[in-house]
Every structure is written in C-alpha cells, then in structure tokens.
Image (cartoon, helix red, strand yellow):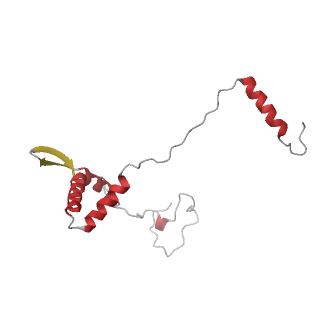
Amino acid sequence: MSNQENDGSEQPPAHEEVGYRKPPMERRFKKSGNSKGRPTGSKNRKTIVKEVANEMHSVIENGKRRKLSTLSLVLFSLRNMALEGKKVQAFKEFHRLNKVYQPQATTDVGYLVVPAEMTPEEWMAEQREKNKHRKRPSGCKP
C-alpha cells in the first residue's frame, strides 16, 4: 500500500486489494454507528421501576415501626381510597388488581387413572394381540 493520500477522485491503485475484511481506502478508518453508545452502568426503565417499587420505607402503624416497600405503600393507599368510596376509579383499579393477582380457586377436580403394572410377558402378549388386528401396508412381510 502506498503512503499517498487518496481524495476519492482517483481510482485506487491496481495492487490495492478490496474484498472480505479489506474495505476500500476511503472507508477504511472511519467510525461507524453510534460511537458513544449507551453509557456503561446506565439502567433501563424496567430496572429503574423495580428499584423504585422495591425501595423500603419506615412506617409507623399502630405505634409500631414497620418497613414496607414503595409498591406496598401505593397499594395500601389505593385500598384506602377505594374503601373511602370517594374515588370510584381507585375502587375499580383495586378490584382489577385484586382479581388479576388473587389466587384462583379450583372448581374442577380431575382424577388420574393409572393402569396396574404388567410383567414383561403380559406386555408382550398384549402387543401381539394388538398387532394381530392391525392392517399391514402392502409390500410388508407378515
């Protein structure tokens, strides 16, 4: 390769190779894409929401100090607003959350029927009996 600068108007020298992992000289040393990118240690929205929701707070209830998460405090305040009856939207939202996250009662009961164990001889006899009644494709030997 030569040390001459190429301003792009001239054709590349005949001996310059261009191909797999050998881009043309005019594109060879430019940065591409998002060079700064996402900073190291930055957090996405899901991580931030988790941290805020799980942050612990000291609360005094009935004269006793308790530690509760932000999510718990928000749900308690939503419940209290719903119980007051002044905010219909709070009641609807609390009812929706309760319905979605409450364990579901099972009403259908099923039974699992397990056949008794068979000896190898019994199993072979049963398979022979099943095979007697099965039709064989044409061209197969009996």
Foreground pick, 79 / 32: 79
62 lies above or below 6: above
Quadrant where the C terminus is found in the figure:
top right
Q: Residue furthest left?
A: 63
With respect to residue 28, does 69 lie above or below? Answer: above
Give the percent coordinates (x, y) of residue 68: 20, 48
Residue at left offset 29%, top offset 56%: 49
Task: In this rendered view, identify the residue nearer to me: 115 or 101.
Answer: 115
Q: Residue at x 79, y 36 (%)?
A: 130
Query: Do we see residue 68 in this rendering?
Result: yes
Left or right: 120 in relation to 6 = right
Provide residue 97's location: percent of width, then percent of height. 33, 57
Q: Position of residue 139 (x, y in %)?
A: 91, 44
| 83 displayed left or right of 61 | right
**Residue at the location (54% across, 72% down)?**
11
> Image check: 113 left or right of 57?
right
Q: Position of residue 127 (x, y in %)?
A: 77, 32
Residue 42 in sight in this render:
no
Asked if residue 117 lies left or right of residue 24, the reply is: right
Query: Number of marks in the image?
Result: 0
Q: Nearer the viewer, residue 19 or 79?
A: 79
